[in-house]
Amino acid sequence: MQRRPCWVEISADAFEDNYRLLASACTGAGDAGVVELLAIVKADAYGHGLALCSQAAVRAGARWLGVTSVEEGLAARTVSPDAEILVIGGPFPGQGAAVVEARLTPVVWGEQQFEELEAAARAAGVEAIAVHLELDTGMSRQGVGADELDAVMERFGAGSRLRLGGLMTHLYAADESDGAATREQFARLEAMVERVVAAGLRPEWLHVGNSAAVLAGEALSALQKICERFGLRPMARPGLALYGLTPEFAPEEPEAVMRLHGGLRRVLEWKTQVVSVRSVAAGQPVGYNGTFVATEPMRLALLAAGYADGLRRALSNRGCVLVRGERAPIVGRVSMDQTVLDVTEIPGVAAGDEVVLIGRQGAESITAEDHAAWVGTIPWEIFTSITSRVERIKV
């Protein structure tokens, strides 16, 4: 049966090219060795499709994938049997056995997680589970603080079923181009790593996260210096840049980011079709509550996409889409399953015409950044709002 005409096209080639470009940039980031790249595919690969993007990442050379939950880790393991899969959100009660069975690498920082994984390892007869310990260097979200570190390190003592495979932190302001907050975080990180190594623990990896850190370069140099000092391997965790976008830096964009702009390729295009076209007279209300009233005779096109697909209701009477290579404004309220366009000035629009919600058509384009600006959010949220009933198609 033919599906309802609302779909997302995913360019696996673009994803692979983006990964290789970022990996190349990391190779030249400093003098302390190549920085490994972990490909973030959490949140259904930022709405792009976890299965498609996980496989693309591995084809491009990624050895590590990053997900939020054990559930996502199991989905990634199904399509990427040989990848290392980092569960950044850690395990919840009752998930330890799945972690062991699927060979996932959980991030840990809390007492419950240690207990869960120790019990799961004993039950499975596993000698040791590799975990990555998150260090809170200033984000105050998850991770072990400096005052908790000594007690946590005892968890990896003799007889423990846990092996410290890596240390990590998250950079909360890597997109602030003055770098002050990031330098403070790295100072705290170095002090905490020193304590871990002094305690006799020997993790293999030290890694930091987000695309801004990878793109700007200064954070990677700081990471490499710490790794060189303590004999660790550096790794970074890009997300948004893998999908072809760059974070918005403030107050100005670093030169290194400007150089990469032309090389990154957009991975996602979101499309639908015109369902029908009708003419209305001046004074005719359009959509729920008549928030738009025709000011003159108009031609309106109905689309097979609404807020249940992820087309934000806040785009009502505000956003645009592309039809026949031209921008057509949304009129009236975006409803759950349908949206209405003003196509009065676009000749020949007819049922079956392809409509681009995000992407390029002819010389025009509409981006996730455009959607974010219209509704007052960020591109990450635009992508992850595209719901599961919108089919993801590899192109």
Image (spheres, rainbow, N blue to C red):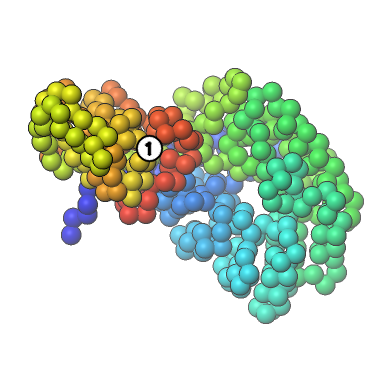
Of 295 and 217, the residue lying toward us: 295
Position of residue 77 relative to residue 209, above or below, is below
Residue 354 visible in the snapshot: no
Percent from the top left, x then y, of residue 34? Answer: 67, 38
Q: Residues within 10 Å of mark 1 (few under 14, many from 20)?
A: some
Percent from the top left, x then y, of residue 194? Answer: 86, 46
Q: Residue at x 42, y 46 (%)?
A: 385
Residue under label 1, please give it: 314
Position of residue 170 relative to residue 148, above or below, is above
Assign the N terminus to one quadrant of the image: bottom left
Q: Secondary structure at mark 1?
A: helix
Of 307 and 163, the residue lying toward us: 307
Q: Residue at x 67, y 43 (%)?
A: 170
Say what amino acid the circle numbered 1 marks: Ala
Assign the C terminus to one quadrant of the image: top left
Q: Residue at x 77, y 52 (%)?
A: 144
| Total numbered labels | 1
Percent from the top left, x then y, of residue 146? Answer: 83, 48
